[in-house]
Amino acid sequence: MQTVILEVAKKELLTYVGDRRFLILCVLAIAITIAAGLGSWQQISHAHTIRSDAERTDKTTWLEQGEANPHDAAHFGRYALRPVPPLGAFDSGVFDFAGATVWMEAHFQNPPANRAAETKLLSYPFATVTPAWVLAVIVPLALVTLLFGSIALERETGSLRVLVAQNASAWQLLLGKGVAAIVIALLLAVAMVAIALLPVFGYRSLDIEFPRALALVAAFLLGYSSIAGVVLLVSSCATSGYKSFWTATILWILMAFCVPLAGAQIAQDAHPTPRARSFASAIQQEAQAPFWLGSAQYEEVALYEAEVLTKHRAVDRTSLDLNRDALVLQAHERFANRVYDRLYGDLYDQHIKQEEVLRMASALSPVLALQRISRGICGTDTHTQVLFAKSAEEHRRKIVEQLNEDMMYHAGDQSFGYAANRSLWETIDDFDYETPSLSQVLHYYRFEIATLLAWLVLAGSLACAVLGRQFRGKLE
Amino acid sequence: MADGIAALQAIDVSKSFADVPALVGISLSVEPGEVLCLLGPNGAGKTTLISVFLGFLQPDSGSSLIFGVDSVIDPVEARKRVSYVPERVALYPQLSAIQNVEFFNSFGPDRGKTGYFQQCLLDVGLQEHHHNQKTKTFSKGMSQKVGLAIALAKQSEVIFLDEPLTGLDPGAAAEFVSRIHWLQESGTAILVATHDLFHVSSMANRIGLLRSGRLLDLVEATELGAYELEKLYLERMSQPS
C-alpha cells in the first residue's frame, strides 16, 4: 500500500517538475523567501549586536557610577533587555511592535520601550515580510495551485475514471497527492529554517536551538498537511477544476487574511486595552499621588515598619537604627507595587483575553494556527513578550528593595547624605531572563496544535469519504 | 465460457438522469473471447452502460455482473478483472509512455518490471523509440495505443473500449482493430461502444443497436454485411421512439 502511495507521489512530483510554470513559481517562491530570510537575518544579527553592546554599556555604567546614595542609584536604574531569539530571523512575530527594553527604576513600573518597528519605517510595508510569513501565508497559496486540480482536473480529463477502473482507492490517491505537495512545501520550510539558524552559530550553541528548529519544521509539516487536506477536500467535491480553484483560493483568502484580521479586530473590540496616555495617567493618580500627597503613606509606613521590626524581633526602629526615609521609600514601593499589580494585571488580563479570542479564531484558520505556533516556537509571541515584561518588573522590585534596604540599615541618620559604592553595585544581579522552553511553548499552544490535527483528520476523512462514495457509483 | 460464467452480464439494467431515461431494461452478456460492439448515436446510452458495469454509476434497477460479481455490490472485486480505455485517453503529459503505463498499473498486484510494460507497449504497436517520450507530444492514435497498453498490462479478462476509433486516421484505426482481434484471440472479452459503422463489422462478433437507452437489436456480425448493417442502423434510428 505504501508503494502505491509513493508511486502516486512520484507521479505528481514528476508532473510538477516537468511543468515549466511550476518551476518558475518555485524559483520565485525561493527568491522571495531567501530575500525575506536574508533581510530578517541581517536585522536579527544587528539586533543581537545592539543588545550585546547595550548590555555591556548598562553594566559598565552601573558599576562605574561612583559613590552614590542607594536610592539615587535606584532612580538611576538599570535596563532589562529582551533576549534576541535566534529564530527571530525566521519569525519576528510581535517583537517588531513590542518594546525590547524596560527601564527598571525606583517607584515606577515602566512598560517595555524601543520597538524595532520604529527603526523600520523606511522598509515599510515590507518590514513584516519574514520567511515565516512567506511560508505560512504564501506557501499555502502554492499548495492551492498545486492541489486544486488533483481530483477535479483528473475528473475533468477522464483520467480519474481510468484510475478507478484500475482499482485505485480514494485514500491512496489523496494521500499520494498530498504527500507530493507537502514534500515541496516542506523543502522550502526546511531551507528557510536552516537559513534562519545560520546566525545562531555566531553566538549560541546550535544544540539549544536545534530542537526548536525541528519543532518548527514539524509544525509546518502539520500545518501544510491540514491545508493540503482542505484543498483536497475541495478538489474532491468540486464538479470542475475552475470551481475547485476559486473555492480553494477564496478559502485561502479567508484563512490567511480575513479570519486573522477579523479575529484581531474582535479581540480588540471585545477586550480593549487602555491608551498609553490614559494608562500612564492612571498610574500617576493611583500609584504616586495618594501616597505622596494623600494619607496612604502613614498606614503603609506603619505596616511596613511593623513587619521589619517583627522580622528582627525588635521593639522599635531606634533599636535597629533604621533610616526612616528609606523605610518610607520602600513602603511606597510596596504601595505602588500593589497598584501596578492591579493596573498591569488588568492590562495583561486583557492581553490574555485577546489571545484567547485569537486562539478561538485559529480554530477557523489553519494558517492563523500555524502562525501562532511558529511565533511561539521562535519565542516572538505575545505570551513571551508578557513574560519578559513581568520578569523585568520582578527584577526591578528586587533591585529597588535591595538598594532601599541598604540605605535603611546603613544610612543611620544621614538619609540622602549616605553614599554607597561599587561593592554594593556589584551585589545587584544582572537581569537574566530565558524565553519559555520548547515544552512550555508546545503546552501553551496545544489548542492550536490540536486545531491543526483536527483540520487534517476532518478534511482528510471527509475527502476520503466523498471520493470513496464517488468511486462507488457516484462518478459523474 | 470460463467456469460457465459470462464475462459480462447485464440483467434488466435501467438508469435515468433527472427523469430522462438513459438505459431502459438492458439485458445482454459477453462471453470470454468475444467482442460485442454497442452501436448507436450520441446519447444512446453506450457510455452509461459501460459506467454501470465499471461501478461508476449505480443503476436504478437491474444488475451488472462481471464474472458473476455484481459491480454495484462489490465494485472493487468486480474491477479486478476489467480494464477501461475511454474515448479520450487522458495520459499525464509530463510522463513518458512507459511511465504512464507503469503508473496506471501501480494499483493492482505487482507486475512491476519495466520490461513487461515495454512489451505491452510493443504489443499494442507503439514503436520502442516512443516509449520514453513524454506523451504531451503524442498524437491521438499514439495516446490510444498507450491507453490500450495500460489495459493490456493489467492482464484483465474484460476490456471496455469507449469510442476507441474516434479521431483516428484510417491507418491507425485499422491497426487498432487488428490489436483488438489479437486481444480477443487471447480470450479477452471486449465491450466496445462506438458509432463507427465503418469498422464495426470487422471488429465485432456481435453488434447491439442502442437508441435512447433501449437495446433494439442484438445481431451476429457475420449475419450482416456492411451494407445490410448500415441499412438496419439507419432504419432503426429513423423509427419514431
Image (cartoon, rainbow, N blue to C red):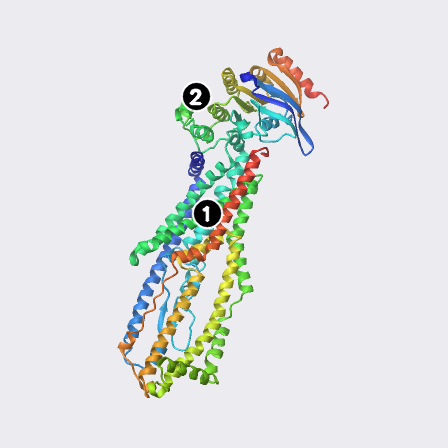
What kind of element bears circle 2? helix
- The spot of residue A404 in percent (x, y) is 35, 79
Height in image: A346 above or below A251? below
Q: Are marks 2 and 1 in contact (CB under 8 Å)?
A: no
Question: Is residue A378 toward the left or the right of residue B83 in the image?
Answer: left
Residue A114 visible in the displayed image: no
- The spot of residue A305 in percent (x, y) is 40, 83
Residue A351 visible in the displayed image: yes
Question: Is residue A197 toward the left or the right of residue A5 in the image?
Answer: left
| Residue assigned mark 2 | B122
> Which label is found at residue B149?
none
**What residue occupies the far right of the structure in this picture?**
B240
Q: Chain of mark 2?
A: B
Q: Amino acid at mark 2?
A: Leu
| Residue assigned mark 1 | A224
**Mark 2 burial class by Cα count in 10 Å: few <14, some 14-19, many 20+:** some
Q: Chain of mark 1?
A: A
Between residue A63 and residue A309, name the one nearer to us: A309
Q: Amino acid at mark 1?
A: Tyr
Disc nearest the viewer among 2 and 1: 1
In the rendered image, the quadrant that contains the N terminus of chain A is top left
Between residue B16 and residue A155, name the one nearer to us: B16
The residue at the point 50 percent across, 45 percent down is: A457
Height in image: A134 above or below B28? below
- The spot of residue A10 in percent (x, y) is 42, 36
Question: Is residue B51 toward the left or the right of residue A81 in the image?
Answer: right
- The spot of residue A64 in percent (x, y) is 27, 75
